[in-house]
Image (tube, grey):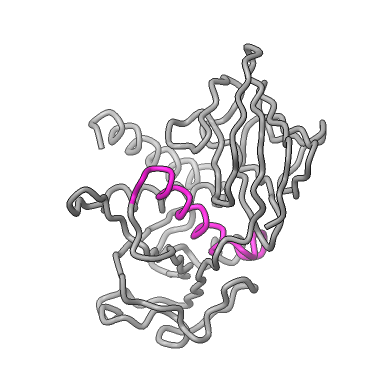
Amino acid sequence: MGPLAALERFFERLFERQTARLFRTKLQPIQLQRRVERAMESQRVRDGDRTLVPNRYAIHIAPPDLAALREAHPSLAADLADAALGFARGHGYHLADRPTVALIADSRIEAGDVRVAASLDSTARPSPGASATGPSQAAEPGEGGPTDDDASSRPRVDQTAVFVVPAVDSPRATLREVRPDGSTQSFVVDGRPLTIGRGPDNGLVLQDSRASRHHARIYGRQGALLLADLGSTNGSWVNDRRVQEIALGEGDQIRIGDTVLIVESVEEA
């Protein structure tokens, strides 16, 4: 990570924390996603010609914040693990297996703050009580949570919910990007999550000043192709209707800032 990128992320973390404390803003899923991505990048290691990154993430959040997040986003942990997989693939990082995310209610964390503990574990397997696609299930430490050898070194927690992302069941789709300057390009969404925005770490980087740094995400779930807004400033629009999350079909037109993405074809999963 270059010094300018490190400085940018320092001020970003500082701004998020102080804003939450001063204005009592609620934590948003995109903030947790950014913290997971930072943890992944800060703990990446070189192994020959590969870059290894952690595949286990424990997100410590104040209990009231976690309760609010779970109520508003029941599949949050699975979505975060899904996004972590897409981020790693988009950067060419190597994962021992699919990422897992644990949301942990930790009374030692201040409201509005987040702490992520990341580890590389190539031997862990999904616990019998963990749900791959269902709603969150809380468990006391040692009951349905991670059980690998370093569990004793982990901080004591109040509740833990562990999720494992299943294999992607998503249709392939061909999209055409119509840029603000009128130029176009077609590309294929192959079932892996695709983040969209101005930031250079997105799978699809938009040269559009009205797009947010991390604007939206296209991903698959249960055989359908979906678009989710990532808390963007100007919103995500499908067929001239502002949406938070929607299933996409052939012929749909997605508007992000002044850029239009046209779904030209969708193949069954």
Magenta-drawn segment: 70-93
Image quadrant for the N terminus? top left
Point out the residue furthest to the top here: 181
Q: Is residue 168 visible in the rendered structure shown here?
A: yes
Residue drawn at x 51%, y 71% as measured from the top left:
163
Q: Does the magenta stretch include residue 149?
A: no
Q: Position of residue 127 (x, y in %)?
A: 46, 83
- Residue 201: x percent and y percent? 43, 36
Q: In this view, does 249 lie to the left or right of 127?
A: right
Residue 139 position (above or below residue 250): below
> In terms of image quadrants, where is residue 147?
bottom left
Residue at 62% from the left image edge and 36% from the top image edge: 232
- Give the residue at x 47% y 31%: 199
Q: 47 or 268, which lies in front?
A: 268
The reply to whether residue 60 is visible in this rendering is no
Q: In which quarter of the image is the C terminus?
A: bottom right
Report the magenta stretch's main SS: helix
Question: Which residue is at the front of the view, 191 or 206?
Answer: 191
Apparent side of residue 252 relative to residue 13 in the rendered image (left or right): right
Relative horizontal placement of residue 212, taking residue 87 as reference (left or right): right
Is residue 77 in the magenta section? yes
**Residue 56's spot in the image, x, y percent?**
37, 66
Quick one: 67 or 6, which is closer to the camera?
Answer: 6
Query: How many tags in the picture?
Result: 0
On the image, which quarter does residue 167 sit in?
A: bottom right
Q: Where is residue 246 in the image (x, y as percent from the top left)?
A: 75, 48
Q: Where 116 falls versus 23 (above or below)?
A: below
